[in-house]
Structure formats: structure tokens, C-alpha cells
Amino acid sequence: MTAMTTTTGHAPVGDLSIYHEIHGEPSGLPPVLLLHGGLFDVDLQFGGIIGGLAADRQVVAMDLQGHGGTNDVDRPLRPEHLADDAVGLLDHLGIDRVDVVGYSLGGAAALSLALRHPDRVRRAVLSSVSFNAAGLRGQNEEAVGELTVDMIAGSPMEATYLAKSPHPDREHLQGLLDKLGRVFEGMDWTDDEVRSIAAPTLVTVGDADMVTLDHAVEFLRLRGGDVNGDFDGLPASQLAVLPGTTHFGGYANPELVLAVLRPFLSVAD
């Protein structure tokens, strides 16, 4: 078996130096862009599925602002900022168009990317993200808003931050936690905005997620789904509910996740 090609690097995008990885080889389909969730990084979020996605196409994965190997800047964590950062990385790499996969905070960035830069997104996977506050269970929002470095001491997130961050100290980590505590303020889109997304969309949610199942179904409806496919035909957008899955463990079952993602992302234009 031929080893998968992997390259890593940092890209200058504004005041950021964005750590990114490129896996696999170019194919007839655009690359897949991976955007992780808050407190995670490329490896923690996507380590189990990158190989499966990159088996027959190129995959680009980036650490978001203040996460992993990417530095933080004096700017809140807003989906529109992260979406523009992603475009800056794609421009640096000379990539015109992608299929984007975003989880939680990365899902909000992917949603924003599809709205702000529709010409750059062919297909979008939006995982465990709500398009407004009504879709969230309150416990998660409150818990994130109260996070401190002591609360995550000894966790894989703390270890990864201290090992990879350009500023690996608890003061900067607390600054990141404070920004994450306000991140839900930026996750608010209107029904019309969600309807207007040009890219076919796969919405995924865990059956025990912080995003409610009712909200995920409404997300699908706004994207043209929840129809009688036998008579009306299959819609371009889809919904997948992952069984036995929490928000924190959303991509923890790689076989299940790949079985859902790969067919949707493999559809040719």
C-alpha cells in the first residue's frame, strides 16, 4: 500500500500564522477543508477520519485562531472571522473551491463560509451546530461560559494546547476559554440566510447532542429537505442523526462518521 502524502506548514493570513495540514493527492473533486470545534485542533477532532477522507482525494485541515499550532490575536472568536481566515488559507494554497466539513465552532465557520464566499464552497457538512440560540440546550452554553483552566486541567485539550500553542501558558489558555465563553453570541442566522446557502448541505447531529433534534430537522427543512422523496425526488441537502453520540464525542466513531460523510462528499457535479 502506498503511504498517504502529508505536508504541514504555517500560512500568513493577516496577523495569524495558520497551522495547516494537507493529506492525500488532488483528484477530480475539490479538496475537503476541515474546520474543528472549540478547544479541539486538527488531530483531536479529525485524527480518526482524515485517512478515510484522504484515501482518494486531497484534504486540507487547519487549526483555528488560538487553537493548536495557530496563534491567537486580539479579536473575538466569530464565525465570520474564522470563515475569512479559511479563505485566506485557501488563497495562500492556491485552492479555488472546496467541500467544507465543520464541527461545532468549525460548523459555524463553515456555515459562514458558505454564506460569505459561496463561490468557494461546493458542498458543506455542518455538524453539531445550531443556526440560532433556540437550537441549543442551555446547560452546554452555560458550562462553556464558565470554563476555567483549572476545570480542564489534565484533559487532552489542555495537554494539546500546552504542547502545540505558540504561547503555551495558562494565562493565554484562559484567554481562549474566555473567548469561547462568548462564542455563541456570533452563532445567529436568519431562516432566509440558511435558505439562501447555495451549497448542498449535510447536517449531522448526535442523538444526545447539545443541538436539539428538533432544531436539526428545522435546519434540514430550511435547506429544502423533509420531503416525500418517492414522489418529489431526493433533495440536495440531507440530515444524519448519529446514534449514541454526544456533542463532545461527535466524531469519536470514525467508521460511522465516514459512512455518513463519504457518500455525500463523493457526489460529482
Image: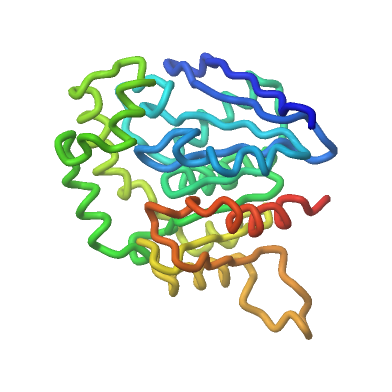
**Residue 195 picture location, percent across and down:** 58, 62
Q: Residue at x 39, y 54 (%)?
A: 188
Q: How is the image coloured?
A: rainbow
In the drawing, does residue 43 fall left or right of residue 174?
right
Which quadrant of the structure image shows residue 148? top left
**Residue 150 picture location, percent across and down:** 14, 36
Name the quadrant of the N terminus: top right
Which quadrant of the structure image shows residue 116? top right
**Residue 38 picture location, percent across and down:** 37, 41
In the drawing, does residue 259 fall left or right of residue 10?
right
Q: Residue at x 63, y 31 (%)?
A: 60
So how many labels did they put on this image?
0
Q: Residue at x 47, y 43 (%)?
A: 106
Q: Is the residue 3 above or below the residue 261 in the image?
A: above
Q: Nearer the viewer, residue 174 or 134?
A: 174
Q: Residue at x 68, y 42 (%)?
A: 53
In the drawing, does residue 100 fall left or right of residue 82?
right
Q: Is the residue 123 above or below the residue 17 in the image?
A: below
In the drawing, does residue 100 fall left or right of residue 44?
right
**Residue 173 picture location, percent across and down:** 24, 27
Q: Is the residue 258 above or below the residue 135 in the image?
A: above
Q: Is the residue 86 above or below the residue 147 in the image?
A: above
| Residue at the front extreme of this rendering | 1
